């Protein structure tokens, strides 16, 4: 039987397993991390009905409905589902899409913002919401506006109007736009009330992008260039991958004022730190190749990722010292942006270089903690901050909120790597047990049998 057919059958059986019982689920005797405050509420029963969180209370006081699917939460921890705020989602119908969605859900990722848009994502977004397709909630951006796709300021404005009319959630900004094009795109988006987000074109610069009302800046794009001394010509020279080659010349005294300007503008930051650090750090490719998540990635893809890292390390002007300085600056920016109140949004840029969907988000959480955030603050970046930014009723465990939930085997407030220890996942009210998740993952393991 063809691989994808087997997968569709297996996923349908998982979906049936997840929803066939009553539409009431009771998590009994679980430790709840509500994310409305930094605390664990021990030994709770949480009742979910029709995809919405209902009663939450002490295990001795909350009756379990007779028709409920009962999930034993003893010694486990219930957190809100996580969000990947910078993903590249394949077009609907792609075989890779089924794999990516399974890997996201298996890792507790229940919301994904697609930052490389495709017209098929509009229907896909609805199919996911209505349960016709298995996977996380999808937030859509339109096809990217960049130096090649936009021919003039008027053309940029026209494309914004068309994408707004089509119903995308975001306009995606990529490099290469000139100042007049970007200004027209921003003005049109602001007039129509559709958010624009992504990169900071070099011709625009960070401070102008902040003044334009950009909703999120991803990858810390533009920040390294904005830290360069005035004599530096921003339009010339070569900074390399997100300007890491500039690290030796920047003025780090300006980090705090840039962070404060970002917070004042209301712009959120999606650092995708794991993408950058993995490419430039000294972790050998042999170690990256042997990570557990690479068993879900075709060997040819892993090979291309290895080549990308090797190219980076051979680049003129690149050295281990420059890379280490770039990492220090980026981590300092993340902490300063967080402290200034510019809400960090969790995103890793999956599936890009060495970032396997779902798995990479746990690495991103760990890097947020390495940058100086507490585990709770790192979790906020993937839960409450995202819900607030997107206007969703998710991100906290409170009555009346949507039931996107993850059960963990250990406490993430004590050790952020506990987010990897997924016991089960609830996606919009449908529960997927550890066995269900293992069935999902097994379909995509490329352990020589595929």
Image (tube, grey):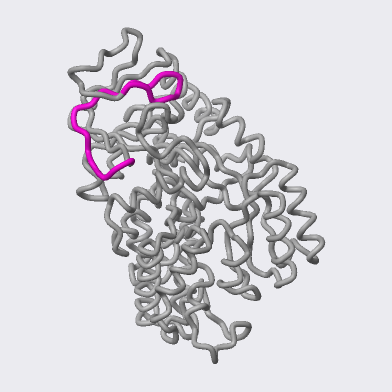
Of residues 279 and 386, which is closer to you in this image? 386
Task: Decide if residue 413 is on the left or right side of residue 185.
Answer: left
Q: Residue at x 44, y 50 (%)?
A: 356
Estimate the x, y position of residue 183 in percent, counting from the top left.
71, 66
Of residues 352 and 67, which is closer to you in this image? 67
Vertical relation: 188 (above or below) 276: above
- Give the image quarter of residue 74: top left
Task: Decide if residue 412 is on the left or right side of residue 442.
Answer: left
Q: Residue at x 32, y 61 (%)?
A: 287
Magenta stretch? 36-55
- Give the image quarter of residue 172: bottom right
Estimate the x, y position of residue 24 in percent, counting from the top left.
39, 16
- Main SS class of the magenta portion in the image: strand
Vertical relation: 309 (above or below) 12: below
Q: Residue at x 35, y 19 (%)?
A: 25
Q: Is residue 260 shown in magenta? A: no
Estimate the x, y position of residue 375 in percent, counting from the top left.
27, 52
Task: Decide if residue 84 is on the left or right side of residue 41.
Answer: right
Give the residue furthest to the bottom.
231
Estimate the x, y position of residue 423 in percent, counting from the top left.
29, 33
Q: Residue at x 40, y 48 (%)?
A: 382
- Give the image quarter of residue 422: top left
Vertical relation: 101 (above or below) 268: above
Of residues 105 and 337, which is closer to you in this image? 337
Give the residue furthest to the front.
264
């Amino acid at each position: 039987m063809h691989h994808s057919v087997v997968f569709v059958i297996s996923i349908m059986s998982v979906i049936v397993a997840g929803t066939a019982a009553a539409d009431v689920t009771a998590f009994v005797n679980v430790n709840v991390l509500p994310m409305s405050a930094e605390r664990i509420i021990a030994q709770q029963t949480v009742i979910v009905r029709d995809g919405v969180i209902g009663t939450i209370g002490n295990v001795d006081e909350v009756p379990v409905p007779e028709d409920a699917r009962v999930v034993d939460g003893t010694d486990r921890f219930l957190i809100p589902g996580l969000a990947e705020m910078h993903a590249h989602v394949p077009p609907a119908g792609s075989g890779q899409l089924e794999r990516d969605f399974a890997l996201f859900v298996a890792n507790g990722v229940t919301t994904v913002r697609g930052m490389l848009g495709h017209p098929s994502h509009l229907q896909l977004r609805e199919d996911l919401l209505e349960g016709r397709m298995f996977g996380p909630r999808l937030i859509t951006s339109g096809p990217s506006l960049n130096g090649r796709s936009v021919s003039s300021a008027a053309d940029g404005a026209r494309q914004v109007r068309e994408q707004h009319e089509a119903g995308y959630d975001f306009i995606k900004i990529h490099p290469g736009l000139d100042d007049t094009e970007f200004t027209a795109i921003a003005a049109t988006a602001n007039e129509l009330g559709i958010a624009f987000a992504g990169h900071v074109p070099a011709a625009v610069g960070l401070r102008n992008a902040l003044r334009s009302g950009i909703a999120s800046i991803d990858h810390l794009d533009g920040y390294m260039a904005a830290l360069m001394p005035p004599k530096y010509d921003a339009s010339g020279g070569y900074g390399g991958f997100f300007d890491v080659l500039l690290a030796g010349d920047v003025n780090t005294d300006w980090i705090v004022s840039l962070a404060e300007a970002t917070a004042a503008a209301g712009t959120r930051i999606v650092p995708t730190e794991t993408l950058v650090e993995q490419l430039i750090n000294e972790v050998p490719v042999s170690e990256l190749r042997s990570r557990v998540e690479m068993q879900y990635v075709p060997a040819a893809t892993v090979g291309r990722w290895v080549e990308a890292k090797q190219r980076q390390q051979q680049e003129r002007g690149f050295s281990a010292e420059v890379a280490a300085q770039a990492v220090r600056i980026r981590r300092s920016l993340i902490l300063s942006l967080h402290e200034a109140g510019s809400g960090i949004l969790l995103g890793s840029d999956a599936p890009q270089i060495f970032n396997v969907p779902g798995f990479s988000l746990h690495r991103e959480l760990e890097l947020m903690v390495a940058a100086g955030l507490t585990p709770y603050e790192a979790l906020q970046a993937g839960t409450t901050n995202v819900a607030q930014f997107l206007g969703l009723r998710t991100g906290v465990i409170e009555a009346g909120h949507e039931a996107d939930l993850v059960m963990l085997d250990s406490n993430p407030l004590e050790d952020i790597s506990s987010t990897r220890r997924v016991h089960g996942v609830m996606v919009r009210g449908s529960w997927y047990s550890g066995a269900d998740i293992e069935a999902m993952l097994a379909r995509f393991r490329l352990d020589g049998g595929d």
